[in-house]
Image: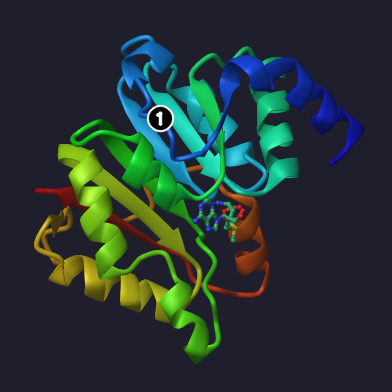
């Protein structure tokens, strides 16, 4: 962690940070003053998160990652830019969803460039799997949108397959395929690295039924 990230952690963690301890249920209304709340899983260094929070102050972003320097970075960005609609959660998104969020509480979920786990024997570690989707669906309000993006063609195909087959989600795209990149999603750090390698990026927008 850089000195700046550590300083932001010290200054802002008490008000804007939370540990995923699985021991309490969050009151999102109290945390975000009644704003609709979108969960972002795996924000990395948080640059895209901060841009989306600045562009849409009427939406709260509950941003979760296990990567501590990124948490400091995002808190620093939120502090310097006066973003009061971001909260940073440290730990595993699955525990957050399972233990700390009540049903029908989220207005959306964003998963941008999740770890692709390239080796076949590691594919089971990928986040977008039927079991995860079943848990997430219970925490999303009906009509809430799950937005995924990836630059790994084969992971994109897997996402499209499991989301299309899942009984709790429906594709927002009439043709049943990938979505055009929504204007609100900024270029992320990992996306930039993928584009530098010539990868093609796919967005998927699925609605909770
Ligand atoms: C490939 S990076 C993408 C970061 C960022 N979204 C971007 O596009 O630049 C994936 C991130 O997901 C985080 N992550 C992976 N599994 C997670 C989990 N179960 N809960 C929270 N964060 C997770 C990793 O720590 C990492 O920062």
Count of numbered circles on the image: 1
Residue 15 rendering spot, x and y as whole percentages: 60, 15
Q: Nearer the viewer, residue 163 or 130?
A: 130
Quadrant of ligand 1: it is bottom right
Q: Is residue 137 left or right of residue 147?
A: left
Image vertical order of residue 36 relative to residue 146, above or below: above
Q: Position of residue 158 (x, y in %)?
A: 33, 77
Give SS at disc 1. Answer: loop
Whole-percent x, y for residue 39 in the image: 40, 38
Is residue 178 visible to the viewer in this orientation of the structure? Answer: no
Horizontal side of residue 123 vs 70, given as left or right: left
Specify the color scheme. rainbow
Please give the name of the residue rendered at 67% of the width and 48% of the height, measured from the top-left corner: 67
Does residue 61 show up? Answer: yes
Residue located farthest toward the right when viewing the structure as drawn: 3
Q: Quadrant of residue 174?
A: bottom left
Q: Residue furthest front?
A: 23
Label 1 CB sits under 8 Å from any ligand 1 atom:
no
On screen, residue 152 versus residue 39, left or right, reads: right
**Residue at coordinates 55% horizontally, 87% vertically from top-left?**
119
- At x 37% / y 36%, what residue is drawn? 100
Categorize mark 1 by other alpha carbons within 10 Å: few (<14), some (14-19), many (20+): few
44, 22: nearer the viewer: 22
Give the residue pinned by disc 1: 24
Picture layout, residue 54 above or below residue 192: above
Q: Position of residue 138 (x, y in %)?
A: 19, 46
């Amino acid at each position: 962690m850089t000195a700046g990230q550590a300083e932001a952690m010290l200054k802002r963690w008490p008000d804007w940070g939370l540990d995923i301890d699985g021991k309490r249920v969050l009151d999102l209304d109290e945390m975000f003053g009644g704003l609709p709340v979108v969960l972002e899983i795996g924000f990395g260094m948080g640059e895209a998160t901060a841009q989306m929070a600045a562009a849409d102050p009427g939406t709260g972003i509950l941003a979760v990652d296990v990567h501590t320097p990124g948490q400091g970075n995002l808190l620093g960005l939120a502090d310097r830019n006066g973003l009061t609609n971001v909260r940073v959660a440290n730990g595993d998104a699955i525990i957050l969803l399972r233990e700390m969020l009540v049903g029908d509480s989220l207005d959306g979920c964003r998963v941008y460039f999740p770890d692709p786990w390239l080796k076949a024997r590691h594919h089971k570690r990928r986040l977008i799997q039927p079991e995860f989707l079943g848990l997430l669906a219970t925490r999303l309000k009906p009509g809430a949108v799950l937005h995924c993006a990836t630059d790994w063609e084969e992971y994109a195909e897997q996402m499209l397959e499991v989301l299309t087959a899942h009984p709790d989600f429906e594709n927002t795209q009439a043709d049943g395929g990938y979505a055009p990149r929504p204007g609100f999603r900024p270029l992320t750090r990992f996306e930039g690295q993928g584009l530098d390698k010539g990868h093609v990026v796919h967005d998927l927008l699925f609605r909770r039924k």
